[in-house]
């Protein structure tokens, strides 16, 4: 969150369409380095689309995304692509061991530090599963392996899509504790969540998206305590049906 | 028996070397004419071997465009014919296998920093069971094949006689015991080769 650096991401005049349908409109948004931005909103609000755009998996239909002040090229050059990673809502495990899944990002970078997997797995309570087949894990375990896999490559930007959805409280606590450790490293995080409490616990700033449009964005405490927009108040009060 | 194995093995290696990359590209990418390529591959899976033999014969015959190679009635011609039979099988089944891999896996792998090549390789690795099936199917298709190798090889003793053509000849001569024995040898060869392929697949896990 240094003022000396350009934002990690800056979106200007962004509009994204699937066919003729506009799914996301962001007139302006800056995501500062080292901050955690919570993206909340109902299903279909465009949250995951925004993550895919930030990961460079899709090119915006209109507008520009700047990364560290420079327009994001498409396709992303490898060095840039390798600074950003996503933990998807439904992480896919490769058909190999948990350890090899965690090491995948290093493997494609030609790095052979196999010892890096264990400390990560330990922090997420998964040490005992290092040699297990990743496809045989439970949902909560898969989410944690996906986080370990993402962090093995020490990204500058971590995009999290519902990392704790449908998990029991113990696993949610584990994942949130891990995210706090990642925050402490100075990693920029964009956290998509249905769970407003999770956003409140983890995000420095919160952005509410509804039907592809930014309703409100602001520091998390202010956003939750005194939302400026009527729709934000309705969403937080659970009055918006979704 | 050794010639059978050499011809089939070489044809399988060539068909795999060409068919797996083509199947992977068709399965993983979208390009104009993709449906046509798919149609051609699927049709190729059902190519009547004897027609392949006929076409290869004409191509390699003295007046054919590849006549000067002098390959007709040599094991090279048999390898060519078997490769043509095996190639669409390998390519089409590879295509199906990579299409069966969850498309989100590619996004996941790319988001972890894989290059395009690494992504393709990872998908192929994930599809390895399907790939083994493709190679096994192609192997089964060509080791048991008789029409094409008979036509282009000529079933010359000591030169181009393979197990299947020897079985045909023995049967025609009424030597059913020999034909049956050769048939058993052929089956055992197929069994052994498939066991090796499955072993390789298991090791890749």
Image (cartoon, rainbow, N blue to C red):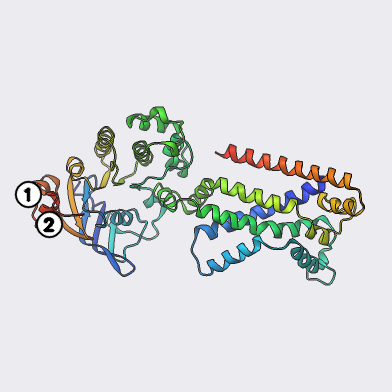
Q: Chain of mark 1?
A: A
Front residue of this view, candidates B167 and A218: B167
When asked about the image quadrant of residue A242, the answer is bottom left
Q: Residues within 10 Å of mark 1 (few under 14, many from 20)?
A: few
**Badges 1 and 2: C-beta atoms under 8 Å apart?**
no
Element on which disc 1 rests: loop
| In-image side of A191 versus B171 (left or right) | left
Q: Position of residue B101 (x, y in %)?
A: 48, 50
Q: Earlier in the sequence, mark 1 or mark 2?
A: 1
Q: Chain of mark 2?
A: A
Q: What residue is shown with label 2? A: A231
Residue sitting at the far top: A128
> Residue shown at 92%/53% (left/top)?
B173
Closer to the observer: label 1 or label 2? 2
Q: Are marks 1 and 2 on the same chain?
A: yes
Q: Position of residue A54 (x, y in %)?
A: 31, 54
User: What's the distance in space between the residues labelled 1 and 2, CA to CA?
Assistant: 12 Å
Q: Position of residue B159 (x, y in %)?
A: 87, 52
Front residue of this view, candidates B89 and B181: B181
Q: In this picture, is B52 found above or below B138?
A: below
> Residue shown at 69%/63% (left/top)?
B47
Q: Quadrant of the C terminus of chain B?
A: top right
Residue sitting at the far bottom: B63
Q: What residue is shown with label 1? A: A226
Front residue of this view, candidates A225 and A112: A225
> Residue shown at 33%/32% (left/top)?
A124
Q: Position of residue A218 (x, y in %)?
A: 14, 51
Element on which disc 2 rests: helix
When asked about the image quadrant of residue A126, the answer is top left
| In-image side of A214 versus B31 (left or right) | left
Q: Quadrant of the N terminus of chain B?
A: top right
């Amino acid at each position: 969150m240094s003022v000396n650096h350009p934002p990690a991401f800056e979106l200007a005049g962004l509009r994204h369409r699937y066919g003729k349908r506009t799914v996301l409109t962001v007139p302006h948004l800056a995501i500062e380095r080292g901050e955690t931005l919570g993206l909340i909103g109902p299903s279909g609000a465009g949250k995951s689309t925004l993550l895919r755009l930030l990961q460079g998996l899709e090119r915006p239909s209109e507008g520009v995304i700047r990364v560290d002040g420079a327009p994001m090229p498409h396709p992303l050059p490898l060095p840039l692509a390798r600074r950003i990673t996503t933990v998807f809502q439904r992480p896919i495990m490769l058909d190999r061991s948990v350890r090899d899944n965690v090491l995948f990002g290093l493997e494609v970078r030609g790095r052979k530090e196999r010892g890096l997997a264990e400390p990560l797995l330990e922090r997420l309570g998964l040490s005992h599963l290092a040699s297990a087949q990743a496809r045989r894990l439970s949902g909560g375990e898969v989410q944690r392996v996906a986080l370990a896999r993402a962090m093995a490559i020490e990204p500058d930007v971590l995009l999290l899509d519902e990392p704790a959805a449908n998990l029991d409280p113990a696993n949610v606590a584990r994942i949130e504790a891990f995210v706090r450790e990642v925050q402490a490293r100075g990693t920029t995080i964009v956290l998509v969540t249905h769970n407003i409490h999770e956003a409140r616990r983890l995000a420095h700033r919160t952005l509410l998206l509804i039907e592809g449009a930014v309703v409100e964005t602001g520091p998390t405490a202010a956003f939750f305590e005194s939302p400026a927009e009527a729709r934000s108040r309705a969403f937080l009060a659970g009055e918006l049906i979704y | 028996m050794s010639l059978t194995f050499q011809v089939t093995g070489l044809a399988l290696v060539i068909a795999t070397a060409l068919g797996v990359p083509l199947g992977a590209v068709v399965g993983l990418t979208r390009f104009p004419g993709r449906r046509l390529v798919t149609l051609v591959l699927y049709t190729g899976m059902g190519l009547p071997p004897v027609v392949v033999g006929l076409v290869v014969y004409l191509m390699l015959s003295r007046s054919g465009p590849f006549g000067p190679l002098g390959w007709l009635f040599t094991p090279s011609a048999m390898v060519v014919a078997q490769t043509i039979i095996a190639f669409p099988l390998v390519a089409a089944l590879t295509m199906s296998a990579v299409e069966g891999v969850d498309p989100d896996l590619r996004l996941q792998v790319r988001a972890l920093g894989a290059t395009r090549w690494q992504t393709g390789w990872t998908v192929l690795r994930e599809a390895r069971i399907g790939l083994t099936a493709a190679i096994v199917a192609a192997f089964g298709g060509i080791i048991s094949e008789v029409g094409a190798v008979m036509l282009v090889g000529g079933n010359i003793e000591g030169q181009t006689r393979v197990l299947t053509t020897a079985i045909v000849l023995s049967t025609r001569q009424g030597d059913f015991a020999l034909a049956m024995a050769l048939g058993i040898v052929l089956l055992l060869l197929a069994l052994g080769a498939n066991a090796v392929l499955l072993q390789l697949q298991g090791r890749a896990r």
